[in-house]
Image: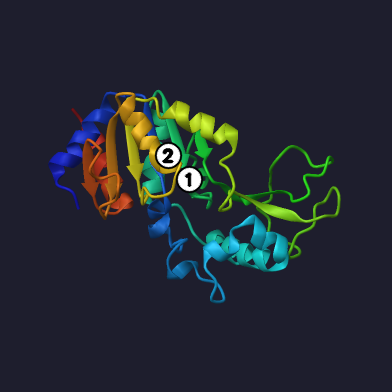
């Protein structure tokens, strides 16, 4: 893991209560047992996420796509927030101006009681009508209960529901993108557990740097963002963030 001096730099920055934004990716949830979206743990009946998480796949085989999402939902229901989620949730309550932008759809940040969360890629626990029927209340609604049928029907028009996530080939919801860009105009920007290859989320650290933010990467491996941030903390997010929080808890 990163040396104590580097950890102390971030702890000192946080102690000043700057306007802070954290961007998280799949690496933050690994310690909770969430399988990698792109790795072998994301395989289902020999198919990869990129084969299933598209509008075309749903149009061709809605039952097959929902079976995959039902399998993922059952996996996630058995997972619990880890120390990384807990530390970020603590920051969200203690810092004066805090935003979390998460690429994760697993809902673990919310289960850790994190405040001011922007779901960049939506939530696996939300649904909407595939047909966008006039009777459905708004765009998305919560549906955390186990599915009674696969694929689930829309309770308003009888058509199909779709998962409340951003699929490959779909645009980021305008509200989420607007809030994320606004949050990137901060004083401290921390990227934790993300590969920094999925755009437009990966470009948020560039926006933050262009606005004068002190930028930090927390990741066990080098990423495309590593060479451009002000501080790199090597190690799993749950270990690094716990170490930062421990320093912040020390009496002066």
Q: Earlier in the sequence, mark 2 or mark 1?
A: 2
Res. 118 mark: none
Q: Position of residue 119 (x, y in %)?
A: 53, 41
Q: Is residue 56 left or right of residue 104?
A: right
Front-most of residues 229 and 25: 229
Q: Is residue 159 above or below residue 115?
A: below
Which residue occupies 41% across, 24% down? 97
How many dots with numbers?
2
Q: Position of residue 161 (x, y in %)?
A: 74, 54
Which residue occupies 21% across, 38% down? 231
Front-most of residues 127 and 226: 226
Which residue occupies 55% across, 72% down? 47
Applied colour scheme? rainbow
Q: Is residue 12 above or below residue 66?
A: above
Question: SS of the residue at dot 2?
Answer: helix
Q: Residues within 10 Å of mark 1 (few under 14, many from 20)?
A: many
Question: SS of the residue at dot 1?
Answer: helix
Res. 109 mark: 1
Which residue occupies 46% across, 30% down? 181
The answer to which image quadrant residue 57 occupies is bottom right
Residue on which the image places disc 2 = 89
Q: Is residue 234 above or below residue 47?
A: above
Q: CA distance from mark 2 to mark 1?
A: 7 Å
Front-most of residues 237 and 164: 164
Image quadrant for the C terminus?
A: top left
Q: Residue furthest bottom?
A: 45
Q: Is residue 22 visible?
A: no
The answer to which image quadrant residue 185 occupies is top left
- Contact flag, marks 2 and 1 (Cβ < 8 Å): yes
């Amino acid at each position: 893991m990163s040396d104590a001096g580097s950890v102390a730099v971030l702890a000192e920055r946080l102690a000043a209560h700057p306007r802070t934004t954290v961007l998280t990716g799949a690496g933050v949830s690994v310690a909770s047992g969430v399988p990698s979206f792109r790795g072998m743990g994301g395989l289902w009946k020999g198919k990869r996420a990129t084969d299933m998480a598209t509008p075309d796949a749903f149009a061709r085989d809605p039952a097959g796509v929902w079976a995959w999402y039902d399998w993922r939902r059952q996996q996630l229901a058995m997972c619990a927030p880890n120390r990384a989620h807990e530390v970020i949730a603590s920051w969200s309550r203690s810092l004066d101006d805090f935003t979390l932008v998460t690429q994760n759809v697993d809902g673990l940040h919310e289960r850790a009681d994190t405040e001011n969360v922007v779901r960049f890629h939506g939530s696996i626990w939300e649904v909407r009508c595939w047909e966008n029927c006039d009777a459905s209340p708004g765009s998305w609604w919560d549906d955390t209960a186990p599915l009674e049928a696969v694929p689930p029907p829309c309770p308003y028009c009888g058509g199909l529901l779709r998962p409340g996530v951003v699929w490959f080939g779909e645009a980021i919801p305008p509200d989420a993108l607007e809030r994320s860009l606004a949050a990137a105009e901060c004083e401290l920007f921390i990227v934790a557990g993300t590969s920094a290859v999925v755009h437009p989320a990966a470009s948020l650290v560039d926006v933050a740097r262009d606005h004068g933010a002190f930028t930090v990467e927390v990741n066990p491996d080098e990423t495309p963002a590593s060479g451009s941030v002000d501080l790199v903390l090597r190690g799993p997010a749950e270990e690094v963030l716990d170490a930062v929080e421990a320093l912040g808890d020390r009496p002066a």
